[in-house]
Amino acid sequence: MADVVKVFRTWSSPFALRVIWALQLKGVEYETIFEDITNKSPLLLQYNPTYKQVPVLVHNGKPILESLVILEYIEETWKENPLLPEDPYERATTRFWAKFGDDKLVPSVRGVLMTQGKEQEEGIPVVIETLKLIEEQLKGKKFFGGETIGFLDIALGWTANLMCVFEEVTGIKFLDAETFPLLSAWIENFSDVSVIKQNWPPRDKLVLKFQAAREKCLAEAATK
């Protein structure tokens, strides 16, 4: 019996994009269900009653939640084109930095994006220092995974597209080739892979989306 794979996502979610990239890199056929987060479908609420968010991978009727957990599931279920290294220590290190990206980089970038004034200024060095730690993982490598895209490239892949969007929205430069030569080269290499670039959301729509989100957040903060 053939596998039935479905992915619940939105057009803009960078976390859902991780799932799409992984499935396509492994050659897994799947059906995409696009969700409107302002009007969530009964199926999404059924499959993810805890967080009620995307992405959700449904494999033969069984839902798997949270993007990094989904990546692990994909890696364990479909062995073609491995995303994690064979060595146990390297696998553990990869998982650490993937979690570091979600635990440290995502909230620090969001903090700068959704604030202004002193709070925003204080957040910028945190983003820069976090990026420096991540860049160190690229020393001597084309991708975080080595010569080919791996688990950590997918986990951090959102930076290759969204950081420049956030720079446009905020007017703050986070990544430049002089300060971050390895990350800058990685962004070019990563974005040049067909599976990656074919799935980028429209940049103009992303800019409008995050401009609106920033304006809404700042307006709400001003009323408190």
Image (spheres, rainbow, N blue to C red):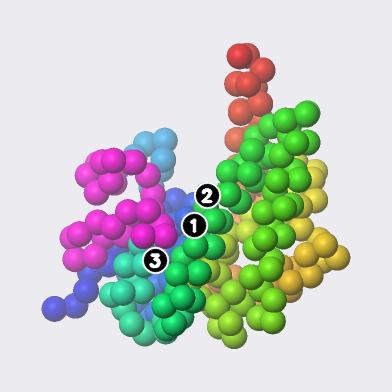
Q: Is 215 drawn above or below residue 188 in the view shown?
A: above
Q: Is 131 drawn above or below residue 197 in the view shown?
A: above
Residue with the mark numbered 3: 71
Asked whether the residues under the numbered discs 2 and 1 touch, taking CB atoms below 8 Å apart as contact, a structural biologist would say: yes
Rounded to the nearest angstrom, the CA distance separating label 1 from label 3 is 12 Å
- The quarter of the displayed image where residue 97 is located: bottom right
Q: Amino acid at mark 2?
A: Asp
Task: Count the labels in the image.
Answer: 3
Residue extent of the magenta highlight: 42-69
Q: Amino acid at mark 3?
A: Leu
Q: What secondary structure is found at the residue carrying circle 1? A: helix
Pinpoint residue 71: horizontal percent, then vertical percent.
Answer: 39, 66
Marks 2 and 3, the one that precedes in the sequence: 3
Label disc, if present, on residue 103 of the rendered structure = 2
Pinpoint residue 220: horizontal percent, then vertical percent.
Answer: 60, 21
Q: Amino acid at mark 1?
A: Lys
| Quadrant for the N terminus in the image | bottom left
Residue at the farthest right position: 178
Residue at the farthest top position: 223
Residue with the mark numbered 1: 99
